[in-house]
Image (cartoon, rainbow, N blue to C red):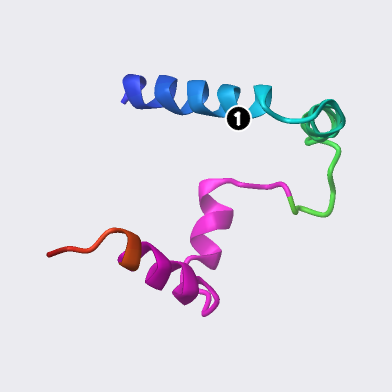
Amino acid sequence: MEATIMETARSLWVIYQQMPAAVKEEFRKLLEHEEEDTTGWMRLTEEALRDDWEAPENDVWDEFYAKQHPTN
């Protein structure tokens, strides 16, 4: 589990390093003000994700994933 966490963190760091400076700045602002956000759009908690898990629009992503990862 910890190895997966480290791999994910490193992958995100690589992506972040490739962003233009203006995007990095906006990303930093979002992280700094995450707790102040009252709209809830940045809430990515397990509970919030679970509530939307069965939303119809997720079928598109399920189909896309299935095409990318065939179970043959």
Residue at point 84%, 49% (across, down): 38
Q: Residue at x 51, y 23 (%)?
A: 9
Which residue position holds label 1?
15
Tell me the residue at 46%/28% (across/down).
Answer: 8
User: Which residue is located at x 50 percent, y 27 percent?
Assistant: 11
Which quadrant would residue 14 be assigned to in this image? top right
Q: Residue furthest left?
A: 72
Is 72 located above or below residue 55 in the figure? above
Using the image, determine if residue 23 lies above or below residue 10: below
Q: Nearer the viewer, residue 71 or 33?
A: 71
Q: What range is drawn magenta here?
A: 42-66
Quadrant of the rendering where the N terminus is positioned:
top left
Which quadrant holds residue 17?
top right
Q: Secondary structure at mark 1?
A: helix
Q: Is residue 28 magenta?
A: no
Residue 59 point in image, percent of width and height? 45, 76
Please determine whether, in this image, residue 30 is positioned above or below residue 45: above
Q: Compare residues 43 and 20 and report the one nearer the observer.
A: 20
- The amino acid type, in three-letter code, at marker 1 is Ile
List x then y, in percent, for residue 31. Answer: 77, 30
Q: Main secondary structure of the magenta part?
A: helix
For label 1, the crowd category at 10 Å Cα-Cα, with few meaning under 14, some 14 to 19 and many 20 or more, is few
Residue 23 in which image quadrant: top right
* Quadrant of image for the C terminus: bottom left
- Between 48 and 13, the one nearer to me in the picture: 13
Q: In the image, is 71 to the left or to the right of 35?
A: left
Asked if residue 1 lies left or right of residue 72, the reply is right
- Pinpoint residue 10: horizontal percent, then vertical percent: 50, 20
